[in-house]
Amino acid sequence: MRSTFKLLFYVKRNVPKSDNSLPLMGRITINKGIVQFSLKMSVPPELWDSKAGKAMGKSEKAKDINRQLEQIRVTINNRYQEIIQAGGGVTAEQVKNAYLGIGIKQDMFLKLFAWHNELFARKVGNGRTLNTYKKYCNLYKLMQAYILKEYNREDISLKELNLSFINGFEHFLRTVRECCTNTIWLYMIGVKHIISVARNEGLLVVNPFAGYMISPEQVDRGFLSEEELQLLMKAPMKNKSYELVRDLFVFAAFTGLAYSDIKNLTKNNLQTFLDGHLWIITRRQKTNVDSNIRLLDVPKRIIAKYEGKTGDDRLFAVPSNWSCNNILKNIGKQCGFKIKLTFHVGRHTFSTSLTLAKGMPIETVSRILGHTNIKTTQIYAKITNEKVSRDMELLSQKLAGLEKQLTATI
């Protein structure tokens, strides 16, 4: 049965304010339910038109009051439509609470999501990163587009979330947004977090992810071989900007630091340990995990090369990530590399060609990279053919005696 929805504005004539103006009230009627609430406004009695439910005349005061009343009317109508679209019955009390921001606000999925993002924004710089906040904002927009396209609504109630909703979002990401499996997997981690917030707040009992499965696909992460790295370091650069970006890439390849961590480096991050060597002492921006790295000669030379050129305590005047990657793409083409050269390839090169391939234990590499889980290091790390060959040569030497005995019997 269709609900009868009415909204009326009126004044309380029996309780005038000290300036003789009258408090403005709102009355919502749905079917036989009626609620009244203060608009937190007042109007001079001579301006109020009880029949029209608005201020009369063309004075600026009257126009301002009517503008505010119209905004309230639009907002209340929107809240009413949101509740209707979410399914189930609607009462005058629900609409009033939705307008006043009581209760109903977090019974809706996107409302809860927006609330989460608002709280997250306040923590940026205090245990949370701006980059992660931007990712949640992007995920919110994707979810908003999905709900609008598939459900023709501005929001959906938490009680409607189920496995079908989650599968539908995956289908939307694959088909409409043309996302790959690994991107979808990352998005779903974010959605799961919002669902956990709803469950922890007692707003959701059933887990819509129950029965849902998705796993990341193994990706061949590019890296430079030792020979390619030498070629890059010796290659002539077209200008100082290209030279700086090349040097920053090499710095990443010899320290394992990511773009954002190099950009944040200051002189305070450089410390000489008891072992007499210069170290970088920092925390990874992405994971907030300690990452302490002893500096080898190449990165020390790069630091010395750019000392005093930033105008402040920063070690390097790092261009934007987009600019760095655009320049690296051109440098990679100049050097004839088959892989697309990006800043992160430097980090992969460290974890592969310069550490694991040289026999450094994966536990040490993981610690240097600032990983919270050694499985992450295993994804980044590649065992090169040269490393396999050296390991097999060591095995051959250890088994030489046994092989000599066995081959004699063949």
Image (spheres, rainbow, N blue to C red):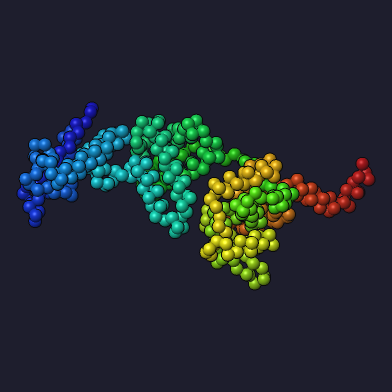
Compared across the picture, whether 78 is left or right of 392 comes to left
Q: Is residue 331 above or below residue 149?
A: below
Location of residue 248 by image quarter: bottom right
Compared across the picture, whether 342 is left or right of 100 comes to right
The percent position of residue 327, horizontal first and vertical second, equals: 60, 46
Q: Is residue 321 above or below residue 50?
A: below
> What residue is at 79 percent from the left and 51 percent from the top?
390
Instruction: Farthest residue to the right: give it.
Output: 408
> What residue is at 60 percent from the left and 68 percent from the top?
271
How many marks do you count on the picture? 0
Q: Is residue 77 visible?
A: yes
Residue placed most toward the observer, 285 or 390: 285
The percent position of residue 380, horizontal first and vertical second, equals: 63, 48
Instruction: Farthest residue to the front: give it.
Output: 239
> What residue is at 35 percent from the left and 43 percent from the top?
111
The percent position of residue 245, horizontal first and vertical second, equals: 61, 52
> What residue is at 47 percent from the left and 46 percent from the top?
135
> Which quadrant: the N terminus?
top left
Q: Is residue 193 visible?
A: no
Instruction: Farthest residue to the top: give it.
Output: 1
